[in-house]
Amino acid sequence: MAEYHLTTPISEEDARKLKVGDVVFVSGEHVYTARDEAHERALEMFDKGEKPPVDFEGSVVYHVGPVAWKKGGKWQIVSAGPTTSIRMEMFEDDFLRKYKARIVIGKGGMGEKTLAALKEVGAVYCSFTGGCGALAAKGLKEVRSYEWQDLGMPEALWVITAEEFGPLLVTMDSHGNSLHAEMDRKVASRKADVYAHIGIEE
Amino acid sequence: MNDPMQVIEDTTVRLLRMAATKLPKDIEDALRAAREIETDETAKTQLSAIIQNIEIAEEGIPMCQDTGIIIFYVKVGEKFPFMSEIREALTNATKKATAEVPLRPNAVNPIVGGNSGDNTGVKIPWINWEVVPGDTLEVIAFPKGGGSENVAIVGMLKPGVGLKGVKKLVTDNAMSYMGKACSPNIIGVGIGGGADIAIKIAKQQLLRPIGERHPEPEVAQIEEDLIAAINATGIGPMGLGGKTTVLDVKVDYAMRHPASLPVGVAVQCWAARHSKAIISKDLGVTFVTHPTEGA
C-alpha cells in the first residue's frame, strides 16, 4: 500500500501504477463533479460530435451532489461527500472509453462493466469516505465554473480546482482488482460464523 | 414576554444547525472508540477520515452534504400553553435553517416532481406527535439521510419462525446492503404491533443512547446477539472491511396479532444526527444534546 499525491491531468501511466489499497490525494484543475444526468449528457454530446465545456481526458470525475452557496459573487462548495456510485454503472464504461478520465471517485464501488473499462482505458475507481462532506469541501478549493446549471445543483457539472483532495482509497484498479468484489466474497464466506451468533445453522 | 412562536422557531433553527454540524457526544465517542480497536489499515483510514470530518464540521459546516429529510419528534405536555404555535414554528425554522446553515434542499414532490427548495412541502417536515403529562415541550430535530433510509425494510414474518427468524431478517439485510448505508451503522428494530407500528418503533430506537441496553433482559439479549452477528460479518466501516459494522443495535417491541410477526428494520448512517431541546411553559429553553456555551 502506497500513498500518492497526484496532479491533474493524470497520465495513463500514473493511473496504471495505482493498486487496490493505495491512498491518493489529488490536486489540480481537472476535477469535475458528475452524477447520473451529467454522465448522460456528456455521452449524448460525444455521440453528436459536440464538445463538452471541459476536457475530461486525464481528469478526476467525482460522483457527488454538493451543497454549494454563492458568497461575495463566487460559488463555494460547502459540503460534498460522495454519492452511491453504482447508479452510474450504466454510463461509466462508455464514459471512460470515450473521455479517458483517469480517476473516478464515489462510494460503494462499481460493477463488472466499469472494472473492465478501467482495465482497458487505464484508470482507477477510488472510494472517498461516505458522509465526509466537510472534509471533502476542504480539498475542493475553488469553483471555477458551474456548468449545466439546468440540471440543478446536485446534478450539474461543477468545475473545481482541488488541493490535496483526499484521502481517496483505490478500491478498483486497472489490473482487474476490486476490493468491493473481494468484500462480497469475504462476507459470504463468513456466513456460518455470523449465523452462529444468532443460533442458526446453514 | 417573549413571543412563543419566535422562541420555538429560534430554538428549532439551532437544533437543525447543531444536528447538521455536530454529532451528539455519545456517537462521536463511539466512532473514536471504533478507531481505537481497528487493526485493519483500510478501516482505520475510513474512521480517521470520519473523525477528521467531524472536527471540521464543528466549525459550522454540514458534516454530510445529504442534510436529510427533516423529521421532528415532539413530546408536548398536556398543559403546555402554546400547542397551536408548534407546527408553524417548526416549518418556519426548517425554511430558515435551510437558507442559513445551509441545508441541501431535499423535499421533492413524488407525484408532479420538482424540489420545493426549502425542505418543506406536503407533510414535510414530518412531525411525530406525542402528548404527554406535564407542561413542557420537547423537540428533537432528526434529519434523516437518504442512503441509510434506502435500506430500511419491513418484514411480515410467519410467527412460527420466532425470534430466530427476526434476527435472521436483520442480519441478512445487513449482509445485503454491506457498506452502502455508510457504516458503521446504528440499527433500530421494532417487533410486533403491525407493519406501520414496527417500523415506527424501529426508527425511534435510533435516538437511544449508544451502549444503552433494553431494560428487559430478553430484549437486551437480542440486541447483543445482533451486534455480535453483524460485526462478525467483517463488512466494516464503509463496507471496506473491519471490525465495526454497527456501533449499536436497538430493539423494542409492541404486542403482536396472533397471526402476525411484523419486524421493522431502520438503519442509520454513522452521521447519526439529532438534537434535542426542552421548552418550559415560561419559554425557558434547555438544549439537551448540544448545550450552549457556559450552560
Image (cartoon, coloured by chain):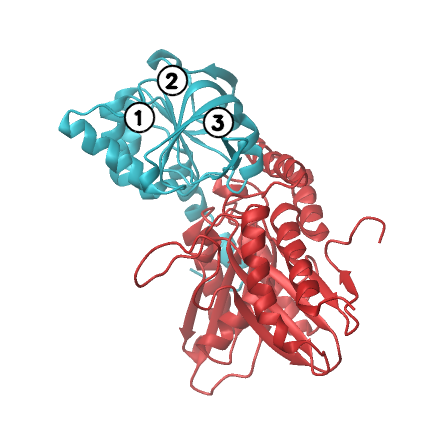
Chain colours: A cyan, B red
Please give the residue where the numbered disc 3 appears in the rendered image. A21
Is B71 positioned to the left or the right of B275 in the image? left
Is A11 positioned to the left or the right of A25 in the image? left
Q: Quadrant of residue A118?
A: top left
Three-letter amino acid code at disc 2? Ala
What residue sits 66% from the left and 50% below the top? B18
Q: Nearer the viewer, mark 1 or mark 3?
A: 1
Bin the neighbour count of mark 1 within 10 Å (Cα to Cα): few under 14, some 14-19, many 20 and up: many
- The quarter of the image holding the C terminus of chain A is bottom left
Three-letter amino acid code at disc 3? Gly
Chain for numbered disc 2 = A
Please give the residue where the numbered disc 2 appears in the rendered image. A15
Q: Is residue B207 visible?
A: no
Label 1 element class: helix
Residue A130 in the image: state x and y as whole percent. 50, 41
A186 versus A20 height, above or below: below
Mark 1 or mark 2, earlier in chain = 2
Residue B95 in the image: state x and y as whole percent. 54, 56
Q: Quadrant of residue B32?
A: top right
Q: Is residue A109 visible?
A: yes
Three-letter amino acid code at disc 1? Leu
Please give the residue where the numbered disc 1 appears in the rendered image. A118
Mark 3 or mark 2, earlier in chain = 2
What residue sits 48% from the left and 60% below the top? B120
Between A15 and A64, the one nearer to me in the picture:
A64
